[in-house]
Image (tube, rainbow, N blue to C red):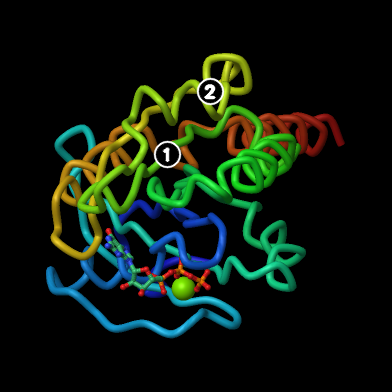
């Protein structure tokens, strides 16, 4: 995964959430700063964006995976190498909050996502009666289920653009670049071990 051919440090970010949450609308807004008319995603969409992290340019690859029931079994194929998880919630759909909470909980149990930050997008804030970020935090028991990772809840409307730039800034801020992640440290340890053993020969 990643921005092939780019020399910039890369971060893969996955956009997950129930069908109709607004993931593809958000991705289109991020890429084109415009509203889109979407169809349910079968498979995934991908967009590459540039950002600055610690005063360096980085390439952020955003993977928007379909959220329909039959698509969710494929979410785990995207866990590997994820620098952060963005979970999009339709804050106006109270009837499906429990379903969304369950899917988030299952996702966060993934070994491959251990320690990865969660940015929960409380989307559709333009709809009357949408749950507030505080209500979302409580409904999802975020303090409890995110005790071992950084997390942030961002109010947002992918259709109007409200909160979208800030959401992206948070994602970049909280994303773990490969050089910062445990996996990379393990690789380095393996390499050192290998080099030491070849010197002994
Ligand atoms: N009012 C409002 N509608 C939104 C917002 N974001 C998305 N929508 C609408 O919600 C519907 C679903 O949006 P999508 O972006 O296709 O949802 P998705 O999460 O990609 O859905 P799947 O691809 O099935 O997983 C569309 O009709 C969007 O126009 C928002 O912030 N406010
Ligand atoms: Mg979609």
Q: Residue at x 21, y 65 (%)?
A: 159
Q: Residue at x 14, y 58 (%)?
A: 161
Q: Residue at x 41, y 26 (%)?
A: 135
3D distance between C-alphas at marks 1 and 2 = 9 Å
Q: Within the displayed image, which quadrant is ligand 1 positioned in?
A: bottom left
Q: Relative to residue 83, is residue 132 depicted above or below?
A: above
Numbered label attached to residue 42: none
Numbered label attached to residue 120: 1
Q: Quadrant of the C terminus?
A: top right
Crowdedness near tag 2: few (<14), some (14–19) or many (≥20) residues, C-alpha within 10 Å: some
Is label 2 within 8 A of ligand 1 (CB to nearest ligand atom)? no
- Residue 3 occupies which quadrant of the picture? bottom left
Left or right of 111? Residue 19 is left
Q: Which residue is tagged 2? A: 142
Q: Secondary structure at mark 1?
A: strand
- Residue 152 in the image: state x and y as whole percent: 37, 28
Q: Relative to residue 39, is residue 27 depicted above or below?
A: above
């Amino acid at each position: 995964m990643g921005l092939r051919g780019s020399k910039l440090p890369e971060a893969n970010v996955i956009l997950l959430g129930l069908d109709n949450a607004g993931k593809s609308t958000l991705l289109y807004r991020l890429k084109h700063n415009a509203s889109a008319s979407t169809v349910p995603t079968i498979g995934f969409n991908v967009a590459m964006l540039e950002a600055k992290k610690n005063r360096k340019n980085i390439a952020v690859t955003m993977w928007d995976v379909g959220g329909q029931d039959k698509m969710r079994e494929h979410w785990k194929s995207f866990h590997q190498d994820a620098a952060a998880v963005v979970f999009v919630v339709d804050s106006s759909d109270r009837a499906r909050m429990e379903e969304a909470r369950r899917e988030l909980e299952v996702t966060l149990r993934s070994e491959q996502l251990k320690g990865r930050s969660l940015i929960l997008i409380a989307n559709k804030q333009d709809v009357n009666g949408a749950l507030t970020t505080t209500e979302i935090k409580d409904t999802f028991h975020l303090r409890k289920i995110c005790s071992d990772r950084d997390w942030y809840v961002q109010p947002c409307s992918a259709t109007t653009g409200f909160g979208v730039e800030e959401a992206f800034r948070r994602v970049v801020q909280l994303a773990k670049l490969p050089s910062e992640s445990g996996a990379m440290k393990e690789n380095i340890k393996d390499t050192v071990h290998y080099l030491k053993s070849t010197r002994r020969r």
